[in-house]
Image (cartoon, rainbow, N blue to C red):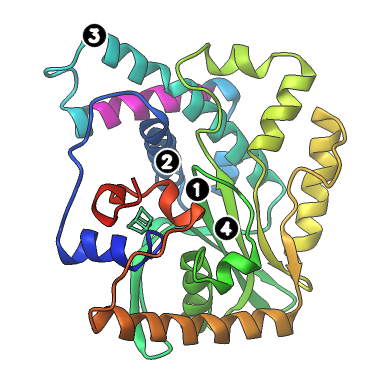
Amino acid sequence: MTRGKFGFFCNYGLGLREEEERAVNEALSGRVVHYCLEQLLTEYAGKKDALISLSDEALSRFARQSVQKFKEEEFFGDFGAAERFSYQLGQLSALAARAAVRLRDEMKFSGFTPLSPEKTVEFRFGGITVKGICDRLEISQQNGKNYLRVIDYKRGKNTVDLADVYRGEDLQMLLYLFGLCEEYGAEPSSVLYRPIGADSFGKGNALSRESDAKKQKQANERKHAAGGIMLEESPERAEVAELNENYAKLYGTVRGGYCAPKLLSREGFSSLKEYCKAYVNALAMETGGGMVSACPSENACRFCDYGLFCGKS
Ligand code: SF4
């Protein structure tokens, strides 16, 4: 419920939707990149070795084909579209290709295997049914245990502030992690937020941009680095250290590393889980009872379309 109770009510209670504008903007670029990564993970499901051996050129080709497919599915190809829109949409394959290259490189250093991209999840958590779609759910078997991690592609920030969680924001991925761990009998490893579409869109091509000066590459990789929350004792911690070392060799050293999730002890994770349970139960009762007043906050309002109705804008 990232938009808060009032946004939730507008969306699911009243069914209010904004008409989609045919324009290449930040939202569309995020969706295109998202779609391409989903296609890639679906095509290579269970074939991790094949995925990590793909060349930059092969990924670039894959991205172009995915964008074409997206255009057919979402906009009926070129039907009724201005030439400029079609051209700009095609240009987004550069962003998708860069995201695909990042995904491949990240997988090279990872012992985690994707369970399925865009997994529809439905589980009971603390007395209520949670439903949603998880961008990436991954599992790793280490030291005789199964560890789960949830990866979310984000247009906004890639960090988690526990104060936001306390206010009920950024709960969604944590709910998925805790609920799915119960379902799979696994240990929670991490919730990672991976920024997508943080590049400017519509400029250059994937490979020429990637061959830019080292500084620009470094800034780009930092901007796209994953953040989030990780279990202190998780074996994933060693992977992150290796990834940071390898990135430092490729792009230079940066303060704090490229991927720097917050570490939380096992006790911290358990408290967080209990808090999430209590919070969603209280929220479900309030919302079910019609208490859906607007609660503006920077995070919740940023990508919310209902500001006109609640009086925020
Ligand atoms: S704009 Fe903010 S306060 Fe208004 S409905 Fe959306 S999230 Fe709630």
Determine the residue positioned at 42% across, 52% down.
301
Residue ID for mark 2: 34
Determine the residue positioned at 25% across, 82% down.
288
Q: What stretch is highlighted in magenta?
A: 58-71
Residue ID for mark 3: 83
Q: Which amino acid type is shown beneath numbered disc 4? A: Thr
| Mark 3 element type | helix
Q: Distance between the residues labelled 4 and 3?
A: 40 Å
Q: Is residue 198 left or right of residue 15?
A: right
Determine the residue positioned at 47% across, 82% down.
279
Q: How far apart are marks 4 and 2 (CA)?
A: 18 Å
Q: Quadrant of residue 131?
A: bottom left
User: Residue 51's spot in the image, x, y percent?
Assistant: 55, 40
Residue 75 within the segment the image draws in magenta: no
Task: For the residues labelled 3 and 2, say whether their Cβ atoms are less than 8 Å apart.
Answer: no
| Mark 2 element type | helix
Which of the image's four quarters has the N terminus? bottom left
Instruction: Please tell me which of labels 4 and 3 falls first in the chain.
Output: 3
Q: In which quarter of the image is residue 77?
A: top left
Residue ID for mark 4: 113
Q: State the predominant SS element of the stretch in magenta.
A: helix
Q: For the view shown, which residue lies furthest in the left direction?
A: 80
Instruction: Please tell me which of labels 1 and 2 falls first in the chain.
Output: 2
